Image (cartoon, rainbow, N blue to C red):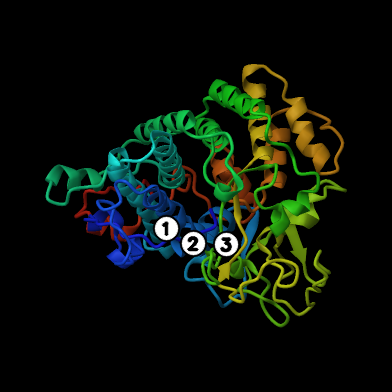
Amino acid sequence: MKKYIKIAITSMMLLAFLACNDDDFLDVDPSVETPEQALSSPTAATELVNAVYNKLLDWNISSFSWIGVTSIISDDADKGSDPGDTGTDKNLLDDFTFTSTSASFKDVWEGNYQGIARANQAFKYLPELEIDESLKNRLIGETEFLRALFYFRLVRMFGDVPLIKEVPNIQNQDDINRANTRAPKQEVYDFIVADLNDAINKLPVQYSSSDLGRATKGAALTLLAKVHMYQGNWQQVYDLTNQVKGLGIYSLTPNYEDIWKEIGENNSESIFEIQARGETPNNGVNNYSVTQGARGAGGWGWGFSTPTEDLANSYEPNDVRRDATIIFRGETLWDGFEVATTVSNAMYNQKAYVSKTMETFNGNDSESNKNIRVLRYAEVLLMNAEAALEVGGDAATPLNMVRNRAGLENAPAVNKMAVWQERRFELALEHDRYFDLVRQGRAGEVLRAHGKNFVDGKHELFPIPQTQIELSGGLLKQNPGY
């Protein structure tokens, strides 16, 4: 599915809901069919859903701000870069002095709601399409998966959020109020679960090579397990992860470092990735890699989101994940590139590294060709292990599968802390650490020990962007403490 489709979608948008202009929401080519004209076109129907996938490539949903509110805010990464370069607000995220006007929160709010708007637009037309029913059902399932992913990101970050289930009618006051009123977190979770349960029944286990990268049954099962994990529904987590294992199509990649290379894209461990490479040179993920590349003389990027000393020093001896996750100043990388001793920071994120000599490089540092891994089989095993501890099952086997792949012996003790530690090392800089700490009830303890100004009862949730509160006319209410 490595395409970047420009598709015309006729839309009425609610400003307070999206807080963006038409150009931000849509990629419009007036020569392309509208949905009304495409009621019997399988190609146009597929492109309608591709437009939802393509939102994941954008700056405000998968790039600098997302890195800030997931990695830099955690104990796995520091702001990095040069001391005087704040990255707009990344210094504030790093030390927990951010406010409701910090730009990163505005970006991720808008980006995910723009994705939801595209999904709702697709849902408006898909049921009416005069195309093969199996294709129609599959496309609906893909869109349900993507909308669930967007809402899951939002509910983890902000708690109660507006729940927009269909394209709002700006002439309808009830629609306006609903789009500007926060629904209870549990209601949002229930909606996510419903979307994913339906998607599971509609999505195939695998695709042909021409559709590689689209959402699968395994992706929906895995995301649903993760959604239940964040609600503490452990029996569901255990059952769902066992279903993923039972599909019999996923396995751990033997070499951990290969996961992050171009040759590791969509491998046996991959369950869902953001498909970054487009048909033309400049259609990758917007600035995901360059923002995290080494800065300074001999560098190749902006230098943000640098691994912390605490992360680097916490790996067990002989854990291959340390060197596969962290680029060290002065080292020679797997492609023969020598990292200059003059770069600004001691460490950088190797999972975001793009080789200009041994991987496809489109000549534009700002548009990375590298896929972003979102769901992996290793996480399924770790969720299964954690759930087994809660419900009474075999936690040692899945836990040790992950450890053994990393070059480690079996865990000396199999308990929650052992699983939590493996999640940190296995998934480092993959955008879950902060939310894991909150879920585990130890965010304050861990982050304050790391020098961050975390306040219990406040920082478990991010502030609702002030611009959204103002656009709503005060209907949106702020989270406690902000």
**Amino acid beneath label 3:** Arg
**Amino acid beneath label 2:** Ser
**Badge 3: how crowded within 10 Å, few (<14), some, or many (20+)?**
many
Write down the residue under mark 2. 65
Instruction: State the mark number for residue 183.
Output: none
Write down the residue under mark 1. 105
Q: Secondary structure under badge 2?
A: helix
Q: Is residue 312 visible?
A: no
Q: Are marks 1 and 3 in contact (CB under 8 Å)?
A: no
Sequence-first tag of 2 and 1: 2
Q: Is residue 302 left or right of residue 330?
A: left
| Picture coordinates of residue 46, whole percent (x, y) | 42, 49
Measuring 65% from the left and 48% from the top, which residue is drawn there? 266
Report how far apart the C-alphas of labels 2 and 3 lie in the structure: 21 Å
**Amino acid beneath label 1:** Phe
Write down the residue under mark 3. 277
Total tally of numbered discs in the picture = 3
| Picture coordinates of residue 239, whole percent (x, y) | 58, 22
Q: Is residue 2 visible?
A: yes
Q: Secondary structure under badge 1?
A: helix
Sequence-first tag of 1 and 3: 1
Would you identify the image quadrant in which residue 337 lies?
Answer: bottom right
Would you identify the image quadrant in which residue 236 lies?
Answer: top right
Q: Is residue 65 left or right of residue 20?
A: right
